């Protein structure tokens, strides 16, 4: 009985320590300021061909940062993506999906 309990605790600890896997969909978008955004399914996210630093908030919201720009990727309840950006000097807007 004690061995089973130890196994269960060890299995739980292993699962809890596993890194989160991003559920990013395949996305191509153009943002104001000539910012091209591309995300492969599962990540990473690129702007203008350069990989951005990804922050996963939850399964439905991600932010990618690089060169003073933040790209926000959210997944709508119907599964469709929405992309927006915040740039230098407070510039911001909604990106157009391709």
Image (tube, helix red, strand yellow):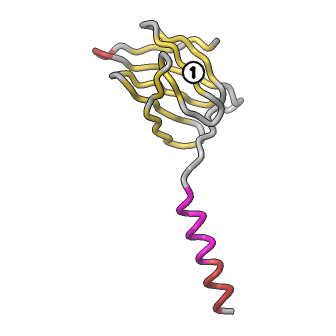
User: As drawn, is 94 to the left or to the right of 26?
Assistant: left
Image spot of residue 40 (x, y percent): 62, 28
Task: Report the predominant secondary structure element of the magenta stretch.
Answer: helix
Q: Residue at x 63, y 72 (%)?
A: 11
Q: Is 13 located above or below residue 53 in the figure?
A: below
Residue 48, above or below 77: above
Residue sitting at the far bottom: 1
Q: Residue at x 64, y 12 (%)?
A: 98
Q: Which residues are magenta?
A: 9-18
Nearer-the-camera pick, 45 or 12: 45
Instruction: State whether residue 34 is above or below residue 43.
Output: above
Which image quarter holds the N terminus?
bottom right
**Helix, strand or loop under label 1:** strand
Task: Provide residue 52's location: percent of width, then percent of height.
Answer: 45, 29
**Residue closest to the eye, 49 or 11:** 49
Picture residue at 36% right of the left edge, 17% below the top: 87
Which residue corresponds to the image point at 46% horizontal and 39% vertical from the top-left?
Answer: 55
Image-quadrant location for residue 42: top right
**Is 69 part of what is drawn in magenta?**
no
At which x and y percent is residue 9?
A: 59, 77
Can you identify the residue that label 1 sits on? Answer: 38
């Amino acid at each position: 009985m004690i061995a089973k309990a130890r196994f269960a605790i060890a299995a739980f600890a292993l699962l809890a320590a596993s890194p989160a896997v991003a559920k990013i969909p395949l996305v191509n978008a153009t943002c104001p300021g000539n910012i091209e955004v591309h995300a492969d399914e599962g990540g990473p996210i690129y702007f203008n061909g350069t990989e951005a630093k990804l922050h996963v908030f939850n399964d439905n919201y991600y932010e990618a940062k690089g060169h003073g720009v933040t790209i926000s990727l959210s997944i709508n309840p119907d599964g469709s993506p929405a992309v927006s950006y915040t740039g230098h000097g407070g510039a911001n807007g909604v990106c157009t999906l391709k």
